Image (tube, rainbow, N blue to C red):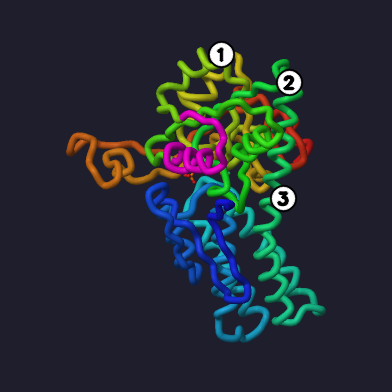
């Protein structure tokens, strides 16, 4: 059985998503009827992970377009689409994928609007088809990332049959349309029978590692160990880690990378450098922001104090304490060995030339 976070049925015009806030205890699919449902699901992290956010956002709009009573004309359809896409971008600010999808689809809609070969109906069909196509494209992109990442790690390693990877957060089937980015690299190494072990961090405060990555690794029977975020230094020192591979929410042109909080800090990138372990970011080109040069310009989402003070609704922190809860941090390009994309692996300095 493959893990499917996003299920789309064109005939029934039905989008359902796996509610990731309930995993691993409960498997519950939610029906997303329209953009408002899509926005809420993204904002409340019922679906999360940069590629999955963009796909669910666009498919929620697909559902709404199909259900919409007839649009007056092409202009009315264009205005509707533009407003809805721009609204979806506001659900979460750090991952660039939804913003890039919105900009690309608004540009496409504008071209179709100005093309007399397209009627309102064919314009609508084209947009709906392209939205649906995102699911298939994302899986293909992830498989290419998985393969490129596995080749890169194997090519740099003397002990090719005993690869051990450390990863952070969740970048797998749950964060994408399937297979995953950093977890895709892990899956590819596993399929090639080169992987002997994975260490995944719990990823406080939201526990994407403990709840979601651990779930995917157990599901795929990949040998893995869950560690607390504050154990990374000890693991890097003692467990012969071949490479660290993480995902990305936004990579800027100089290679700086926003990813889940803890990627940069004392936990991973800095420690990997100190222990001479290569540190890779696995990211589709949809996560690379070609309009932003450096990481300092990335807006970092701040989330509620409750994510820190409570676990499963139970308070674990002293009443009255203030909290600071940024959802992401930015790893400077200087700590990154390579960025693994669907078209190859590039050093941060090379990235601009290839994207
Ligand atoms: O807050 P989240 O769970 O959406 O954060 C997810 C991450 O940071 C992932 O590493 C990133 O989006 C890449 S997912 C392929």
**First-in-chain label (1 vs 2):** 2
Q: Which residue is mark 1?
A: 275
Q: CA distance from mark 1 to mark 2?
A: 16 Å
Q: Is residue 220 magenta?
A: yes
Corner quadrant of residue 252: top right
Q: Residue at x 72, y 65 (%)?
A: 108
Q: CA distance from mark 2 to mark 3?
A: 25 Å
**Residue 293 seen by the camera:** no
**Residue 211 seen by the camera:** yes
Between 150 and 321, the one lying in front of the other is 150
Between 336 and 340, the one lying in front of the other is 340
As drawn, the residue found furthest toward the left would be: 319
Do tag 2 and tag 3 residues touch (Cβ < 8 Å)?
A: no
Q: Which residue is mark 2?
A: 156
In this rendering, would 120 be left or right of 323?
Answer: right
**First-in-chain label (2 vs 3):** 3
Q: Residue at x 22, y 41 (%)?
A: 315
Query: Which element is circle 2 on?
Result: loop
**Category of crowding for the residue at label 3, using alpha-carbon neighbours closer than 10 angstroms: few (below 14), some (14–19), many (at least 20):** some
In this rendering, is residue 196 above or below 3?
A: above
* Magenta residues (range): 208-225
Q: Is residue 125 magenta?
A: no
Residue 318 position in % (x across, y down): 19, 34
* SS majority, magenta: helix
Query: Which element is circle 3 on?
Result: helix
Residue 242 position in % (x across, y down): 62, 21
Q: Nearer the viewer, mark 1 or mark 2?
A: 2
Residue 271 position in % (x across, y down): 52, 18
Q: Which residue is mark 3?
A: 140
């Amino acid at each position: 059985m493959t893990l499917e976070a996003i299920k789309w049925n064109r005939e029934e015009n039905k989008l359902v998503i796996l509610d990731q806030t309930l995993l691993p205890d409960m498997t519950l699919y939610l029906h997303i009827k329209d953009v408002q449902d899509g926005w809420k699901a993204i904002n409340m992290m019922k679906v999360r992970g940069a590629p999955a956010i963009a796909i669910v956002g666009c498919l929620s709009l697909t559902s709404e377009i199909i259900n919409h009573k007839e649009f007056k004309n092409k202009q009315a359809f264009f205005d509707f689409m533009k407003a809805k896409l721009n609204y979806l971008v506001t659900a979460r600010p750090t991952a660039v994928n939804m913003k890039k999808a919105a900009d690309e689809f608004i540009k496409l809609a504008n071209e179709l609007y100005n093309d007399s070969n397209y009627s309102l109906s064919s314009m609508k069909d084209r947009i709906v088809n392209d939205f649906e196509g995102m699911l298939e494209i994302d899986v293909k992109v992830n498989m290419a990332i998985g393969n490129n990442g596995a080749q890169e790690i194997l090519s740099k390693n003397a002990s090719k049959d005993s690869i051990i990877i450390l990863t952070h957060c969740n970048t797998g089937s749950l964060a994408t349309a399937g297979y995953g980015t950093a977890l895709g690299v892990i899956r590819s190494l596993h399929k090639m029978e080169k992987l002997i072990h994975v260490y995944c961090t719990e990823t406080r405060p939201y526990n994407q590692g403990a709840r979601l990555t651990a779930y995917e690794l157990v599901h795929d029977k990949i040998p893995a160990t869950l560690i607390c975020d504050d154990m990374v230094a000890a693991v890097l020192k003692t467990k012969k880690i071949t490479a660290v591979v993480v995902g990305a929410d936004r990579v800027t042109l100089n290679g700086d990378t926003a990813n889940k909080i803890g990627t940069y800090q004392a936990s991973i990138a800095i420690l990997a450098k100190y222990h001479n372990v290569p540190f890779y970011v696995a990211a589709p080109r949809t996560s690379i922001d070609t309009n932003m040069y450096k990481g300092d310009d990335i807006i970092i989402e701040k989330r509620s104090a409750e994510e820190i003070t409570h676990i499963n609704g139970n308070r674990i922190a002293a009443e009255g304490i203030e909290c600071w809860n940024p959802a992401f941090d930015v790893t400077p390009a200087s700590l990154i060995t390579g960025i693994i994309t669907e078209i190859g692996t590039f050093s941060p300095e090379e990235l601009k030339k290839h994207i």
